[in-house]
Image (cartoon, grey):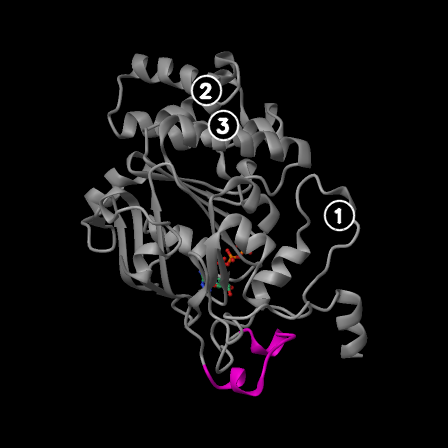
Amino acid sequence: MSKDDVAAGGARPAEQRLLDVKNLEVTYANGAAAVRGVHLSVGAGQKLGVAGESGCGKSTLALALLRLLPAGTKVSGEILLDGEDILTMKWGRVRAVRWAGASIVFQGAMHSLNAVHRIGDQIAEPILLHKKATQTGAKTKVGELLEHVGLPAARADAYPHELSGGQRQRVMIAMALACDPRLIIADEPTTALDVMIQAQILRLIEQLVAEQDLGLMMISHDLAVLSDTCDRLAVMYAGRVVEEGPASEVYENARHPYGKALSAAFPRIGDAASRFAPRGLPGDPPDPSALPTGCTFHPRCPVAIDSCATDDQALRDAGPQHRSACVHAGSQLPAQPTSASAAESAS
Ligand SMILES: Nc1ncnc2c1ncn2[C@@H]1O[C@H](COP(=O)(O)OP(=O)(O)OP(=O)(O)O)[C@@H](O)[C@H]1O
């Protein structure tokens, strides 16, 4: 088994993979290189978390997986869904694969749901579109789906504004499951929710994934949420996966300074003490139309050495099934400065 076989999907044989992304590159029409050389995989029953700050390319990756990117965007590489490359599929086949092969739960359910249609009709739409049931059958299925995500079947008659944020997100999950997909892509599924509701939605997703042996790719800026829910994590920076490995390892023993900063910025769920000492990383991710030379993280990196400004770093072994694209990958990273000390040193 090659390193790419192990990458992010764990040591499952290739034939069991639901999603296999190979060397994916996405460049928007304005020249923004939003995803660069990404390899990922997800098998049945596996939960892969994709982490990174705003602008690192996470949503672009999710949209690319179902060919939802705007016209004029250049995409290359391979995106194998159950062995079929979505990038070379005819549009008719792409439409068949959306919802039924893989579906996306987007962030912000209020914006994703249509305000003027009852939620039952919205959940029924993909079922009818994919001819998974008759009108009557779809109505029954909607009721079952709502109950499955913890809502009474009668809520099918409600409009989105009549539901709470958490209930709306449950509706989005019901809709994502409507055509019995094998892979769910959840893009910041709990971002707009308070902590209690967030925990309920995460447990619901976990339960559904386990019950139905689904594959899950969950995207979030919050490494703590991902490490709590997922088996493996891939940390993205400037369009690249810069660290990947078992979730607890990446969260607790990050081997890339960016992964380390991200894990320090998001305290563990339930760790009340660390909530009072979050540490931030000064600066912003680079403009994807004008990336820095060398390691793209070097301008913000507290442990950069001279060569980081010129030498790009590929992912390399940093522990069992753990890889990091850092010159320091093979050794323990020095402690990160706190935001306070970083601010002091910057002033
Ligand atoms: N349609 C577009 N045209 C040009 N550039 C875009 C487009 N959409 C996104 N980008 C750029 O691509 C980069 C990656 O954006 P993307 O939304 O994928 O990041 P993200 O990590 O998902 O951030 P967020 O969490 O804020 O959605 C950003 O620099 C963004 O400005």
Q: Nearer the viewer, residue 89 or 218?
A: 218
Mark drawn on residue 171: 3
The image's mark for residue 275 is 1
**Would you place residue 108 above or below residue 6 in this image?**
above
- Amino acid beneath label 1: Arg
Q: Residues within 10 Å of mark 1 (few under 14, many from 20)?
A: some
Residue 118 shows up from this direction: no
Q: Is residue 205 magenta?
A: no
Q: Which stretch is magenta?
A: 297-311
**Badge 2: residue crowd in 10 Å (few <14, some 14–19, many ≥20):** some
Q: Does the residue at mark 2 contact the one at mark 1 (Cβ under 8 Å)? A: no
Is the CB of the residue bearing disc 1 within 8 angstroms of ligand 1? no
Q: Residue sitting at 34 percent across and 55 percent down?
A: 6
Disc number placed over residue 148 in the picture, else none: 2
Quadrant in which the N terminus appears = bottom left
* Position of residue 319 measured from the top left corner of the image (x, y, whole percent): 47, 61
Residue 302 drawn in magenta: yes
Residue 45: name its quadrant. Answer: top left
Q: What's the distance in space between the residues labelled 2 and 3, CA to CA?
A: 10 Å
Front of the two marks 2 and 3: 2
Q: Residue at x 59, y 68 (%)?
A: 332
